[in-house]
Amino acid sequence: MAYSIAPASLALSRSILDRAADRRRDEEWLAKAWAAPDTQVVVVSEDKLRVTPDRTALLFVSPAEAPEGTKVFLGIDRESGAGQTADGRAVFAVLIDGEADESYAGLREMGAVLDDREAGIAVNVIGLSNWHAVHTHCANCGAHTEVVEAGHVRQCPVCGRSHFPRSDPAIIVLVTDDQDRALLGRNEAWPEGRYSTLAGFVEPGESLEAAVRREVLEETGVVVGPEIEYAGSQPWPLPSSLMLGFYAKASAFDIEVDADEIAEARWFTREDLRALVEAGTMALPGNISISRRLIEGWYGEELTGSW
């Protein structure tokens, strides 16, 4: 296999902000950073961020303009100069309650148009926002947890247990056969003509390669041989996944879908794919997805048309 993904094409894997984890427990520094006039704050409601009116960038506000909510320190923009903190410009988020209005947008809409700095900020804070939303109580004793370490830990005041944000590893793989055809599947919940690469969560005690073989076999009945190549990774904080991309070569090619998650799976030649996409009868994964990049890496160039 000689397929590859250009790292720069993974829209949600870009990040240049220094997360400055060493500052998360420094309350004096955090207070000074919050008070600095050049500090930037992004406002988040559930899994959506406040954006500019033209919906091409995040809308940053000053701490004085920020609404009430859970404050999260995201890092230091060292590219901006010395700033008021003597380290660079600090970047925070405020997580608010309530439904997002039209001034907010999600990653599916914004991920591909944000620059590297803002893409990294968006992915980080949406992941944290989703984690805070479902970890309000201690998994050990059930008590309400408190936000500490600048929004990166939730502490139980009763049993003392600390709870940290988690990323769930999931493999996503484009499998090819002995004719260099690509295996794509359609989820049971998707409409006709919507296909993607195969994916699934890594189980406890399982290697990534074992997860690739298990998921492909379970979903399609196709057997993956010894050839498995890592292609790249991309966070997918919707709500908390890390997608680990692979290319793999099948050693047995008969398809028998599980009829649970996968409604249909097929082997596609490059000619099949182009003809169906150009005819409008096949929809590819969105441009911000690693699935799209795996397909294009196999195909050999960018494709038009998406979900």
Image (cartoon, rainbow, N blue to C red):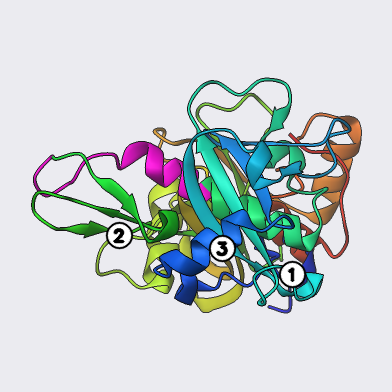
Residue at horizontal 35%, vertical 73%? 207
The answer to which of marks 3 and 2 sits earlier in the sequence is 3
Mark 1 to mark 2: distance in Å? 45 Å
Q: In which quarter of the image is the C terminus?
A: top right
Instruction: Say what amino acid the circle numbered 1 marks.
Output: Gly
Q: Which of 232 and 16 is in front in this view?
A: 16
Instruction: Say what amino acid the circle numbered 3 marks.
Output: Lys
Extent of the magenta region: 127-142
Percent across and percent down for residue 3 are 73, 73
Mark 3 to mark 2: distance in Å? 43 Å
The answer to which of marks 1 and 2 sits earlier in the sequence is 1
The numbered mark at residue 83 is 1
For discs 1 and 2, the disc positioned in front in the rendered view: 1
Percent across and percent down for residue 23 are 48, 72
Residue bearing the label numbered 2? 203
The numbered mark at residue 212 is none
